[in-house]
Image (cartoon, rainbow, N blue to C red):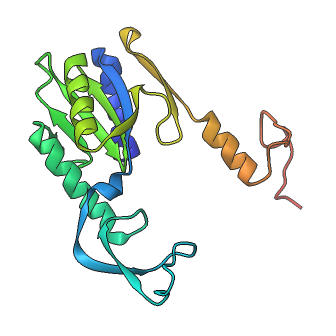
Amino acid sequence: MCLESLHTILALAAIHDLKVIQFDITSAYLHSTLKEEVYMEQLEGYITPGKKDWVWRLKKGLYGLVQAGRMWNDKLNAHMESEGFTATAKDPAIYIKNSWASDDFAAAGFWVDDCVAIGSRKELASLSKSVDAKHGITGPGEVKWVLGMLPECNCSAHMIAISQEAFIDSTLARFNLLDTTTVTAPLAPGSHPFCS
């Protein structure tokens, strides 16, 4: 799901007073079976004694494997279609079930193994239950952290605020800028840095 799609489904939840949930799918890439023959060297620490030169044939996808993402997407798509969801044309990682006019509308967006869904309580409970039964989920509940953002939902007041404070703090820490002095304007009024 692209960032614009996430913003859109959160905005729709606020406008239409819909419930917002999220969950993580456990070991998403391991749920898909590879169609191609893929081999890898034995990992350090897992080398079978007496068979050091052997290689392993992978049956399931692993994170970082080129084919794994596509295979997981195929598996997820098949599951969502079996549950009555349809992928949108604009963003195929967003799935819609039923129409706005119905009381059982739901939309779900996936970012690899993270899901953010909006809709009626009944449809969201059904979605969580079916994905959990098929693949296993962790952290089900109200949306907390998604893609480095903290959405604060108050859908009954038709408002959702998004904070990226943690992302900004981690970026500042990465560049060793946590102890810098902040200023309200980038330059002092009247200064001309590019003039000699």
Quarter of the image holding residue 63? bottom left
Of 80 and 189, nearer the camera is: 80
x and y percentages locating residue 26 in the rendered image = 38, 45
x and y percentages locating residue 169 in the rendered image: 69, 41
Residue 162: x and y in percent read: 51, 29
Residue depicted at 18% across the width and 35% down the height: 96
User: In x, y percent, where is residue 22?
Assistant: 38, 31
How many callouts does the rendering have?
Answer: 0
The residue located at (24%, 64%) in the rendering is: 33
**In this rendering, would 172 be left or right of 105?**
right
Residue drawn at 32 percent across, 44 percent down: 110
Compared across the picture, whether 99 is left or right of 36 comes to: left
Q: Is residue 89 visible?
A: no
Q: Please indicate whether residue 62 sits to the left or right of residue 131 in the image.
A: right
Left or right, 96 with respect to 170, comes to left
Say which of 16 and 50 sits in front: 50
* Vertical relation: 116 (above or below) 58: above
Q: Is residue 37 above or below residue 145?
A: below
Instruction: Give above or below for 187 relative to 46.
Output: above
Quadrant holding the C terminus: bottom right
